[in-house]
Amino acid sequence: MWYFISPDIFFGEDALEKLREIEGKRAFIVTDKVMTELGYVQKIQNLLDMESVVFDEVEPDPSYETVIKGKEMISKTESDVIIGLGGGSPMDAAKTIRVLYEMPDLEIENITPFTPLKIEKTTLILIPTTSGTGSEATTAIVLTKKDEQRKTPTVNIKAGADIAIVDPSLAEALPPAVAANTGMDALSHAIDAYISEWKSDFADGLAIKAAEMIFQYLPRAYKDRNDQEAKEKMHIAASIAGLAFGNSQAGLSHSLGHSLGAVFHIPHGKACGISLPYSLQFEAKEPEVMDLLAEFAYYLKIEDVAALVKKIFDLLTAIDIPHSLKKTDISKEDFEARLDKLTENASQDATAVVIKRTASNEEFKKLFEYMYEGKEVDF
Ligand SMILES: [Fe+2]
């Protein structure tokens, strides 16, 4: 069944004021230590007209253990409002904690697109403080199985937020490198969505709009964190891209990116950003994808698909993200030692299911090799 799902979105300056209107008895705030230190948790608590309990133990690439700890904590609180505050990690943790709180007998592994989730007693509010993951606008959850060095992305139409608050003042403290990484995550979402096997007419326009905004504003938002307009546009573009991929699904840049993130701990957006141009070179060998990318380029007033790929590389240059894995701090020895693991992860990633030109294990391996060397994909 086709669908288009969106939370109620409140955006722009002072959107956070929406919190004053939220009704409930007790809020459970899922976040990380940085948000507490920055005073953002306190800011949220000051706006809420109810008691609140804080769980600020979410780490980057949250583990199953962390989420279970959060579930155990919330189970003692009788909360009816759950707030996820931070980047993708706290927001995805909040989504999962909510599901497990509502359905205590459910195992995390059993949250799949086909699980009938019963969500009845809580309101989930997601508040991003980075400009990229789009988690506030999606029904996707990405957790990491630390012992297996593997990310386990999943989606469920009931897993998303009821309310997203996209207030650019919360991206104020974002360091430039994080703005760059998360911005590339958003661009990957937009383009992946447009060429997904599950692409949706409802989402296509959002993908185009988000990409247009990211090409225009990401270099500015990276270079000058006092550029309020660029920061605000990037914060909004990330949510728009979230709506696009949340309804169409992420693709090959994410199959590769998830694997790189889990094995080499490269930040998600940076991993997807480096993967993006190579994934497009590969996908574009399929005529149907070539046509879609040509159409996408046309809407963005870019000459052709080759120029689109070049524009992505140019964007990476502008925001100081290397074009190849070789230029990150991964040594050749490490890369070769982990290549089989990288390949296995990517080929098993849930996002690999929705790509139009599916990749064999051999092709995944070659893609990583080409990405390492920075070679144009010719297969
Ligand atoms: Fe992503």
Image: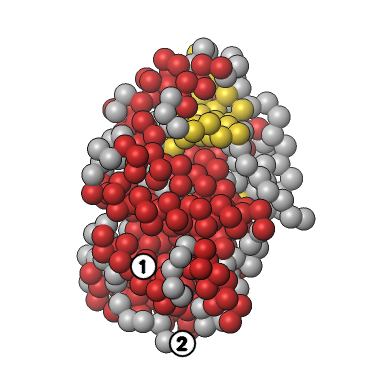
25 in relation to 164, above or below:
above
Q: Residues within 10 Å of mark 2 (few under 14, many from 20)?
A: few
Kindly identify the amino acid type of the residue bearing the numbered disc 2: Phe
Disc 2 is placed on an element classified as loop
Percent across and percent down for residue 180 are 31, 52
Question: For residue 379, which numbered disc appears in the image?
Answer: 2
Disc 1 is placed on an element classified as helix
Residue on which the image places disc 1: 311
Q: Is residue 32 left or right of residue 360?
A: left
318 in relation to 376, above or below:
above
Kindly identify the amino acid type of the residue bearing the numbered disc 1: Lys
Residue at 48% from the left image edge and 83% from the top image edge: 362
Percent across and percent down for residue 78 are 59, 20
352 in relation to 190, above or below:
below
Residue at 44% from the left image edge and 73% from the top image edge: 303
Percent across and percent down for residue 25 are 59, 14
Q: Is residue 283 left or right of residue 122?
A: left
| Quarter of the picture holding the N terminus | bottom right
Q: Residues within 10 Å of mark 1 (few under 14, many from 20)?
A: some
1 or 2: tag closer to the N-terminus: 1
Question: Decide: marks 1, 2 in contact (CB < 8 A)?
Answer: no
Q: How is the image coloured?
A: secondary structure
Q: Nearer the viewer, residue 366 or 137?
A: 137
